Amino acid sequence: MTSLLNPFSVSIDPRSGDLAPDRNVQERHLSDMPRHYLDASARDDDPLVYAVHQIDVPATSSNLLSSTTTLYPGKVGLEYFMTKGHFHKVRDRAEIYYSLAGEGRLVMATEEGEVRVEEMRPGIANYVPGGWSHRSVNVGDSPLVFYAIYIADAGQDYATIEDKGFPVVIVDSGSGPTAVENPRFSRS
Ligand code: PAN
Ligand code: ZN
């Protein structure tokens, strides 16, 4: 028989996304995302784009994995700072994002290329159904912080997005954040 986990509690700073006690933190710099932006050469520095603070639990279908993401404000060319984005390895695994600070867009797409863009801001919970890839984009001028919860065996498939991209990209059109067709998107 598998042993039970002990109950635990974590404190979340909604402004920074920091957890106490602190957990597994993964940082993503621009150099970690060479294929994600349309024009990665638009900057010659290597800013920290986002950090994920994960509350680790065993990766089984009976546990819920959760994390905060702190996505910093900034742009690469016309594109706002964003996460890599992924499908779940176990494709049907859904996820909930609950925003704690900042302003963003959640871009979701199916493997057939159907796309949806939803707003992210404090007080909004976004539901990402199974089968939809997802990427968050910070369209504001302060950190976008959100809490994510999903079934712990979901896993992340980054390669499909690295190869094909999302059908749309979120750019600063001069009059605010706008979803435009991704010229590099390739349908499966
Ligand atoms: C989130 C993401 C997190 C970072 O916890 O993993 O926001 O984005 P990338 O994983 O695309 O780099 C999630 O969707 N987990 O499944
Ligand atoms: Zn996910």
Image: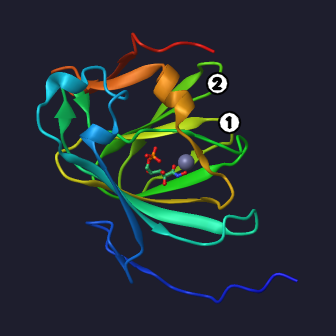
Point 22% across, 43% down: residue:
140
Where residue 184 sits: x, y (%)? Answer: 41, 13
Q: Is residue 14 among what the camera can see?
A: yes
The tag earlier along the polypeptide, 1 or 2, is: 2
Residue farthest toward the right in the current orientation of the protein:
1
Point 65% across, 89% down: residue:
6
Residue farthest toward the top in the current orientation of the protein:
183
Residue neighbourhood size for the residue with mark 1, other residues' Cα within 10 Å, grouped as few (<14), some (14–19), many (≥20)? some
In screen coordinates, is 171 left or right of 98? Answer: left
Point 68% across, 85% down: residue:
5
Q: Is residue 78 among what the camera can see?
A: no
Q: Which residue is mark 2?
A: 111
Count every numbered label the image shows and give the total.
2
Q: Amino acid at mark 1?
A: Gly
Q: Amino acid at mark 2?
A: Glu
Q: Quadrant for residue 145, please give it.
A: bottom left
Residue 151's label in the rendered image is: none
In screen coordinates, is 47 left or right of 101? Answer: left
Residue neighbourhood size for the residue with mark 2, other residues' Cα within 10 Å, grouped as few (<14), some (14–19), many (≥20)? some
Residue farthest toward the bottom in the current orientation of the protein:
6
Q: Which residue is mark 1?
A: 131
Where residue 35 sits: x, y (%)? Answer: 37, 27
Where residue 18 sits: x, y (%)? Answer: 32, 71
Q: Are marks 1 and 2 in contact (CB under 8 Å)?
A: yes
Q: CA distance from mark 1 to mark 2?
A: 8 Å
Point 62% across, 27% down: residue:
110
Residue 167 vertical position relative to residue 23 in the rendered view, above or below: above
Q: Quadrant for residue 84, please give it.
A: top left
Where residue 154 sits: x, y (%)? Answer: 66, 52
Q: Quadrant for residue 12, please give it.
A: bottom left
Where is the C terminus found, in terms of image quarters?
A: top right
